[in-house]
Image (spheres, rainbow, N blue to C red):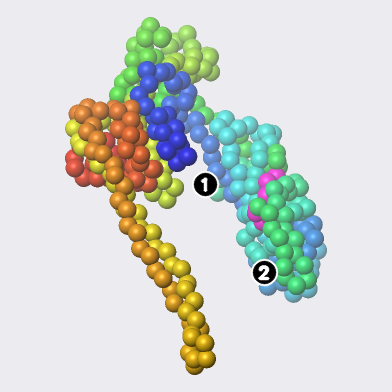
Amino acid sequence: MKKSILLLIIMLAITQPMFGVRIKDLVEIQGVRENKLIGYGLIVGLTGTGDKAGSEFTVRSMANMLRNMDIAIDPNLLKVKNVAAVMVTSTLPPFAKSGQYIDCTVSSIGDATSLLGGTLISTPLYGPDAKVYAIAQGPISVGGFSAAGASGTGVTKNIPTVGRVPHGALVERSIELELGDHLKLIMNNPDFTTTHRLAKSINTYTGKQLAFPVDISTVKVDVPGDYTENIVAFVAMIEGVDVSPDSKAKVIVNERTGTVVMGQNVRISTVAIAHGNLSIRITEEPQVSQPLPFSRGATVITPQTGVVAEEGGRRLMVVPSGATIGDLVSALNAIGVTPRDLITILQAIRQAGALHATLEVI
């Protein structure tokens, strides 16, 4: 079974014919990005699962909220078991307009045990510039629950102290962006070869010299005059252009799970590989020793220990110079390696200077 999983994982990375990936999936347009929002709020209406009486910040928040409603009350008289203090987070999409609704997430910052059934009251959400960009409010959707008995025994599913308010934040401030007369495409995975191919593909598709590689991660694209008033159509056009991406030769190893993934450009110099397993089995059988009749001896148990050591007979495999992943997989599969064995073998090949790729352990 392990051998089959190993083969499946590595064969997925075996060199394939050149394929095209949309520019849309390779780059981000500089300036067209999301913005993170954050705020502090209160959730009310909980069934005794809110913050405990010692949560001073929750009590003070309730007192301040009531004071703003012209209700003066001593904070020491407030009970907060049905109220929970939370941090509210959301993501403002690019070109967001006033009046749009976005989702937000609420997370308990006190000792509330569950937010199930609660309602978030009006909470301003701030951007990095300390300006209010949205107002969040609404019932909480929690994907879990928590229940406990009087003795303290209980059951919890998922995380009941984190929930979402679908379409719970109303955008109050619009985000205006100007793309101008040129675009800057930022590579998700910077690479000189891919950047060059991307610019060449755009120029070939449009029939004009519009794209110019700036550096390893940036391509500048001029907007033609006939698209100045219709830049959305121009962006949509170039996003659909196919590019054959390139990448450095890499071998990614996760020693905790035994996962190994190899890139298609991995090459190996001539190397001989031998792999043998030493198996040691220790067995113990208790033996009962009975005394002779009418003797004063006692019955005792004496352990009988057996030790057997076996070394697997694996033959030597030679991988020729310039071998690809397919060659390596075939050779290692022939000597019956497991994913854990493969990690050790790859590290040894790298130490021998025969692995022409970056070995990255995660």
Q: Is residue 164 magenta?
A: yes
Q: Position of residue 235 (x, y in %)?
A: 49, 18
Q: Please tell me which of labels 1 and 2 falls first in the chain.
A: 2
Regarding residue 181, the answer to whether it shows in the image is no
- Left or right: 149 with respect to 183? right
The residue under the point 37% across, 9% down is 204
| Image quarter of residue 4 | top left
Count of residue discs? 2
Q: Amino acid at mark 2?
A: Ser
Question: Which of these two is toward me, 31 or 18?
Answer: 18
Secondary element at tag 1: loop
Q: Is residue 75 above or below residue 189?
A: below
Question: Which of these two is toward me, 174 or 312?
Answer: 312
| Image quarter of residue 159 | bottom right
Regarding residue 312, the answer to whether it shows in the image is yes
Question: Which of these two is toward me, 245 or 152?
Answer: 152
The residue under the point 37% across, 27% down is 14
The residue under the point 68% across, 54% down is 157
Q: Position of residue 294 (x, y in %)?
A: 52, 91
Q: Which residues are magenta?
A: 159-165
Q: Amino acid at mark 1?
A: Pro
Q: Position of residue 100 (x, y in %)?
A: 67, 33
Q: Dot 2 corresponds to which residue?
A: 55
The residue under the point 50% across, 34% down is 33
- 1 and 2 marks in contact (CB < 8 Å): no
Q: Dot 1 corresponds to which residue?
A: 128
Question: Which of these two is toward me, 45 or 349?
Answer: 349
